[in-house]
Image (spheres, helix red, strand yellow):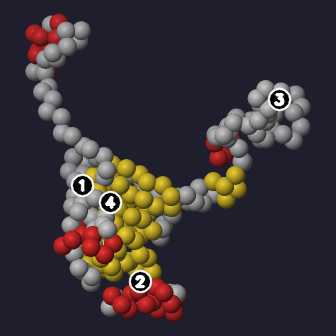
Amino acid sequence: MKKAIIGKKVGMTQIFDESGKVIPVTVVEAGPCVVTQKKTVETDGYTAVQLGYGDVAEKKLSKPEQGHLKKAGIAPKKYLKEFKLEGAADMNVGDEVKADTFAAGDKIDVTGISKGHGYQGVIKRHGAHRTDMTHGGGPVHRHAGSMGASSHQSRIFPGKIGAGQMGNVQVTIENLDVVKVDAELNMIVIRGAIPGPKGGLVYIRNTVKNNKVKNVETGISKNPQKASGRNPQKASARNG
């Protein structure tokens, strides 16, 4: 990946673009992050950097964590995360990564821990239907129902929906747009929603999606099955 940063979700709001359209956005307090460790091919077999984010009291870290950061000469950090960046070889321990690493218009992937909803039933967790509330049915209207086990197949197939823990898992939302970056406030404004509650930790990377710019000419289609291809004069008059 080309660039990455650690941040904290502040919350959602909306802004207006130049044409007056409303854009729903998520505000992230991104960085500043400090390079706490550098991995090299000679010593580790690959190239990467470890970033630290969030100041914390030294007593809240374990002895190995304290020793790791003291060896690097870095103040205590709450979160550590390793990234295989393309420019990792040119970075050194102590370098800062700030929000202006990204710019408006960048495509990014955001990873976070989704909101936990506890132990939920099959209706809320998977959108299953309940039985009719009339004509009896007893206290089983919201139950999962038959699992289909009989003489054949005599088992439940893997992946069968059911009650269980909902949320509180790692989720990555891909191909989001960076709307605005404010380096002074360590702020990155992202179009749309991202995983996690307010104050939740998020990792922002440049997207793994391959966004190709299509050179599509507007006007007459080359497809003879389309109306604009069968009657170019009508299509040109409509576009004009």
Circle 2 residue = 77
Q: Are marks 2 and 4 in contact (CB under 8 Å)?
A: no
Q: Nearer the viewer, mark 1 or mark 3?
A: 3
Question: Looking at the picture, which amino acid does disc 2 mark?
Answer: Lys
Of pointers 1 and 4, the one earlier in the residue sequence: 1
Q: CA distance from mark 1 to mark 3?
A: 54 Å
* Crowding near the residue tagged with mark 3, few <14, some 14–19, many ≥20 C-alpha atoms within 10 Å: few
Label whose residue precedes the other's in the sequence (2 or 4): 2
Which is more N-terminal, label 3 or label 2?
A: 2
Sequence order check, earlier mark of 3 and 4: 3
Q: CA distance from mark 2 to mark 3?
A: 56 Å
Instruction: Quickly name the residue at label 1.
Output: 106
User: Does 17 sit above or below residue 136?
Assistant: below
Residue on which disc 4 sits: 205
Please name the residue shown 69% across and 36% down the image.
Answer: 157
Residue depicted at 48% across the width and 55% down the height: 171
- Where, quadrant-wise, is the C terminus in this rendering? top left
Farthest-out residue, top: 230
Percent of width and height locating residue 65:
46, 85
Vertical position of residue 82 compared to residue 208: above or below: below
Residue 135 position in % (x across, y down): 87, 28
- Could you tell me if the residues under marks 2 and 3 are in contact, i.e. CB atoms within 8 Å? no
Q: How many labels were placed on the picture?
A: 4
